[in-house]
Amino acid sequence: MKKALTVILAVLFVFLMTDAASAKSYPGKKVLYIDSYHQGYGWSDGIEKGVKQGLEGTGVELKVFRMDTKRNTSDEFLKQAAQKAKAEIEAFKPDVVITADDNAAKAVIVPFYKDSSLPFVFCGLNWDASRYGFPTKNITGMVEVAPVKELLEQLKPYAKGNRLGVLATDVETNRTEAAAYKKTLGLQFEEYFCKDVADFKKGFLELQGKVDMILIDSDGGLYNNAAEELKAFFLSNTKVPTGTCYDFMTPYAFMGFTKLAEEQGMWSAGAALKILDGTAPSAIPLAKNKEGSLIINTKIGKAIGAQIPFAMLQSAAQVIE
C-alpha cells in the first residue's frame, strides 16, 4: 500500500496542473515533441510517456520527432538532425513545440527560434537553462535536477567512509551533470567517464579501489544490448554501496533515489495546454523537478552484506528481488 501511495504522490501535482486544461478540447491544435535522443532510452521514453498522458483526451494532434544524438555524437550529425527538426517544424506547423534534453535546445531552439513567435516548452535541461539564454518571451520549461544529496544520505549508512566516485558514459550530458555536482552541490569525488561496455566495467572496478561509495550515472541507453551481461557483472563485483538517480540504472546499483521522467513530460504538456489557452510562455515560470522514488535492489544489497531496515523496504516505490 505504501509503495502504491509513494508513486501516486510522486505524480499527483503534475496531474493537478494539467487537469483543468485537459478537460477542454483543442480541435485542430498541434504539438510537436522533439526528443534529443532515441526510442528505447529509458529517460526519453519516460518523458514521451508523460507528454502523451498530459495531452490525452484533449484533441491535440501530437507528433514525435527523434534527433537520435545520443547514439550519434558527432557535431556534423547534430547539425543535420537540427536541420531535419527545423524542416519538421516548418512542415507540421505546430502551435507549440515541446523539446526534451540539451541537444534540441542547443541546436534547434537557440539558432532558429529563440525570441521568435513560435512557443517552445523545454524539459530535461540539466541544472541550469540560463546557459542557453532561457527563458525568453517564447520559451519556458522545466529544468532537470538530480536528487544526488538525497541519494547519498541513503547510501552513507552502508559505506565505510565518505569518499565518493562517479561512473558515467562519456557524453556531454553526464559531464554537465558531474560539473553541477561539484559547482551546485559542492561535492568532491573521483570520476570515470567510460567509452564502451568494457570500459564501463573497467571504470567500476577501478573506482571501487579508491572510494567508499559510487554514484552510477546514466548509460544513455547505449548499453541496452549488454543489459543481462552488466546485471551479472555488477551483482558479482559490487563491493561498496552504489546508487543512481535513474530508474533504468537500478538493476546495476544497490539503491536508486530516482527522478521521474514522466514528471518532466506531464509538466511540459500542462504548460503547452496553458499556452494553447492563451497564456504567454513568459508568464509561465521556469520549474524544477521535485519528485523522486526510492528503489532498492536487494540482490546487490545482499552481495555487499547490507542490512536493510524493513521500514525502508516498505516505503520503497520498488524492490528488486
Image (cartoon, rainbow, N blue to C red):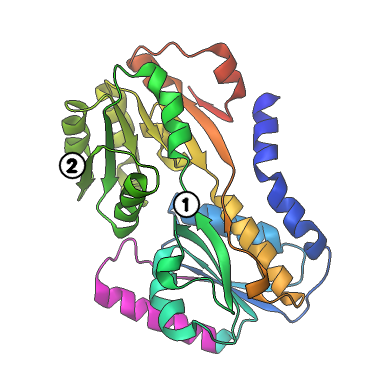
- Is the N terminus in the top left, top right, bottom left or bottom right quadrant? top right
Tell me, for residue 198, which label it has, or none: 2
**Going 27% across and 22% down the picture, which residue do you hit?**
236
Q: Is residue 151 left or right of residue 238?
A: right
Neighbour class for label 1 at 10 Å: few (<14), some, many (≥20)? Answer: many
**Going 68% across and 31% down the picture, which residue do you hit?**
4
**Going 22% across and 34% down the picture, which residue do you hit?**
204
How many angstroms separate mark 1 from mark 2 (CA)? Answer: 23 Å
Say which quarter of the image contains residue 135. Answer: bottom right
Callout 1: SS: helix
Is 73 covered by the magenta stretch? yes
Kind of residue at badge 1: Trp
Q: Which residues are magenta?
A: 65-90
Determine if residue 222 is in view: no
Residue 275 placed where, x, y %? 70, 74
Q: Is residue 267 left or right of residue 47?
A: right
Q: Nearer the viewer, residue 41 or 167?
A: 167
Foreground mark, 1 or 2, reads 1
Say which quarter of the image contains residue 315. Answer: top right
Is 21 covered by the magenta stretch? no
